[in-house]
Amino acid sequence: MTDPLTALRPRRSWRESLAVYTSRRMLAVLFMGYASGLPLLLGFSTLSYWMAKSGVDLTTIGLTLSIGTPYAFKFLWAPALDHLPLGRLTRWLGHRRGWLLAIQLALAGAIVLLGQTDPVSLPEATFLAALLMTTLSATQDIVVDAYRIEVLHEDEQGAGAAATQAGYRIGMIVAGAGAIGLSDFLSWDLVYLVMGAMMLVGMLGVALGPEPKRPPPPAEFARKQGGSLVLARLRHAVVDPFADFMGRRGWLVILLFVLLYKYGDAVAGAMHNPFFHDLGYTGVEIAGVTKVFGVLATLAGVFAGGALVARLGILPALLVGGVLQAVTNLLFAAQAALQLDSVTALAVVVGADNFTGGLGSAAFVAYLSSLCNVAFTGTQYALLSSMMAFGRTIFATSSGWLAEHLGWAEFFVSTLALAIPGLLLLFLLLRLYPPPPPVEAPAEEAAVVPLGSGAQRR
């Protein structure tokens, strides 16, 4: 079996690279990315802003971030989404799109339900409603990620990562700028009602996208009968995806790297909105700068990250993004120490942080996609993204406590140190999978070699 990320890849022309974004499949991936980004912010930064504005203490806000736990454990139910049909929905739309439509309808309802709760008088109800929303959101992500990897050709996966991140950030504009800006004029129950309605936009991906072809079942299924067939299918769904991944060189290093790559960035990001609130910014200012300008900066970073992957390869691009996204946390520390509360200062800090975060995210999604075997797409990607989510949510629950006990400037400096373990693991991955130099190819013969090995992706 060929190791991932070591194949030589000829460079493509700029025209060929941009043309891939015009396909119907890529547009569907864009809308599905939007559907993933919208509920994420509603359960994290927007919810934390709502709680801070309502007078909830920082420690409680930090602990509430544990509602992101389903993102860390979604691989446990991913095999069901890979293999179980949904009756008429599956016959009508296909396996992936049928699941996606059912989940999105339920998710829209859960968002509305969250808005009906009161985080001050009955925080337990807010927690449970938010937990339901994030569980459905994590389940949707399993299908969205599997759909992207399965419906796109191998040489489109890098562009697919950029399209997913672009749609994801657009969803974050709606859930961030939309929700926080509206909160200055509407009650929170109406804000979340609007957000539930905006979730329906994500269903355009189901309508536009074709159903990807499913890999045929293993030949052994045709030879099995009775109970042995059930056991064979169960093994294929539950055991084989993990056995396949654990058969790769350095698999434990890969998992630890995925866990820690975004650790420092996630801890800092969890407290951005409470920090801005403490500095005295209004909801409109936060929405305009952090959720509109900031997301546009992230989109610029996403496409810069895609170009960097094409130029340097995935692992070197991850290194550049990882260093930059850690260093920009120092800008928040400087803003806190100097008490810079102008909109210009906010734009500079947020713009730099979001650009580098988008750059790292594009390379990161391309890396995770390259590791998946299409026979187990949903389960393997869910495992990898669950490790990422674990660092983003479970570890980040201490962010409120750290901010209260260290102060804002020292808190943001500490997040730089939290990024170091992930970067050290990346250096180890570079030793395990040293990137080869790019190979020039004639334009008429240029065809990108898979990011992952052909043996793993087929």
Image (spheres, rainbow, N blue to C red):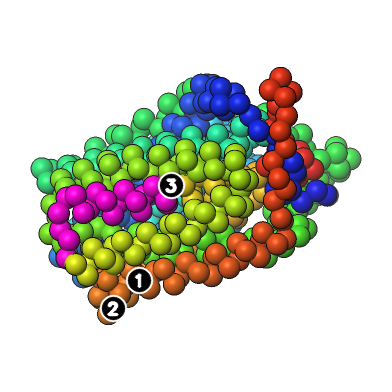
Q: Secondary structure at mark 3?
A: helix
Amino acid marked by disc 2: Leu
The span shown in magenta is 339-357
Amino acid marked by disc 1: Val
Find residue 432 and report its horizontal and vertical position in percent.
Answer: 72, 60
Categorize mark 2 by other alpha carbons within 10 Å: few (<14), some (14-19), many (20+): some
Categorize mark 1 by other alpha carbons within 10 Å: few (<14), some (14-19), many (20+): many
Q: State the residue position of label 1.
A: 413
Q: Is residue 219 left or right of residue 204?
A: right
Mark before the other along the chain sequence, 1 or 2: 2
Depth check, front residue: 33 or 78: 33
Depth check, front residue: 206 or 328: 328
Find residue 96 and report its horizontal and vertical position in percent.
Answer: 57, 34
Q: State the residue position of label 2.
A: 406
Query: Magenta includes 349?
Result: yes
Q: Which residue is found at the position 27% from the left and 71% from the top?
A: 409
Res. 96 visible in picture: yes
CA distance separating discs 1 and 3: 21 Å
Query: Magenta includes 280?
Result: no
Return the mark for residue 358: 3
Q: Which residue is found at the position 43% from the left and 57% from the top?
A: 325
Res. 365 visible in picture: no
CA distance separating discs 3 and 2: 28 Å
- Toward which corner of the image does residue 267 lie, by quadrant? bottom left
Q: Is residue 434 above or below residue 83?
A: below
Mark before the other along the chain sequence, 1 or 3: 3
Q: Pick out the residue farthest to the right.
A: 223
